[in-house]
Image: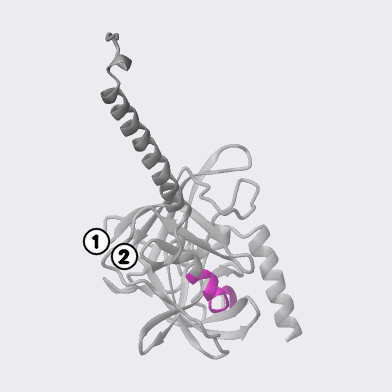
Amino acid sequence: MFKLLAALAASTLLVVGTASPASAIAYGENARDGAYRFSVLLTMTGLPTADRGTRDSSCSGALIAPTWVITAGHCFRDAKGRKVSRTVAESTRATVGRTLVSGGRGGQVVEVIAVRQSETTDVALAELAAPVTGITPLRVATYPPSPGEKLRLTGFGLTADQTPAERLQTGRFTIDAVGDSLLETSGIAPQDDTSPCPHDSGGPYFRTTDAGPELVAVVSGGPGCPHTGPDYSARTDNISDWITATTTSPGPSRFYLLALIPVALAAAGLLVWAYRRTRADPGSRPGLGR
């Protein structure tokens, strides 16, 4: 147990300080057309770099509410590598419900407009500019995972030969150990070295239940891929209250619009008052005298 906790602590430091947005699953398999439609590809264009340049990158994630995507917290970092509760790239877009990375039909592409970072683990919630329709969001688990439990992972990005995946990849994993905020997960199918790679960051690990798939964790960090043995994923069951509160409350953009309503009403009232006054007082009209 001491070795597990030490490894989990080291992984947390890696994620917060130096982890890079992750790739697709090494030695995974192609997802069937129309399967796992809640899976999300987050595409960041124009990310700032330390040398004042820009770069492009991507992460994986899952739709958990019509206007919210869950992903890894380190997918949103500034040029100094610090996690931030805001979009960082010139454009961050969420592609939802599309199996093919490019050229596929169906699905929706929506701009990310705001970010919320968890204070306890490597998880972020990305708010979308418009609701996604026709796709059932992935339900978030509210009870803890157990060692030996089997999970499925979906993700976009690089494969075992370090080339970009052309379609959504998936694989099966088992939970080796459960920590306070992280899980150890090891690949079991299609191969024992099935593993997440860089750009799988934020990809959902989910269990199968009678009520449908249920989110357990998201990809956080781990060794280079492919490999046997554990990776580290950020638990979501123990932050489910925060997730629910965030995704069911008006976001900053909505608060902004709500704040404009009384201002607009006040302005309209002033215009009406001024109009009525000029109608009642002819002497106040331009060009007229008493």
> What is the basis of the colouring in this image?
one colour
Q: Position of residue 48 (x, y in %)?
A: 56, 42
Q: Residue at x 47, y 68 (%)?
A: 203
Report crowding for label 2: few under 14, some 14 to 19, many 20 or more residues within 10 A (C-alpha).
many
273 or 84: nearer the viewer: 273
Q: Which residue is mark 2?
A: 97
Residue 281 left/right relative to 249: left
Q: Quadrant of residue 9?
A: bottom right
Judged from the image, the secondary structure of the residue bearing numbered disc 2 is loop
Q: Position of residue 57 (x, y in %)?
A: 48, 52
Measured along the vertical axis of the image, is residue 98 above or below residue 142? above
Residue 42 left/right relative to 73: left
Instruction: Name which residue type carries label 1.
Output: Gly
Residue range in magenta is: 229-244
Kindly check if marks 1 and 2 are in contact, taking CB atoms under 8 A apart as contact.
yes
Measured along the vertical axis of the image, is residue 262 above or below residue 125? above
Instruction: Name which residue type carries label 2.
Output: Gly
Judged from the image, the secondary structure of the residue bearing numbered disc 1 is loop
Residue 106, labelled with which disc?
Answer: 1
Residue 32, labelled with which disc?
Answer: none
Q: Position of residue 281 (x, y in %)?
A: 30, 21
The quadrant in which the C terminus is found is top left
The quadrant in which the N terminus is found is bottom right
112 or 195: nearer the viewer: 112
Q: Quadrant of residue 208?
A: bottom left
Q: Residue furthest right?
A: 2
Q: Do we see residue 226 in this rendering? A: no
Q: Mark 1 to mark 2: distance in Å?
A: 7 Å
Q: Residue at x 50, y 62 (%)?
A: 125
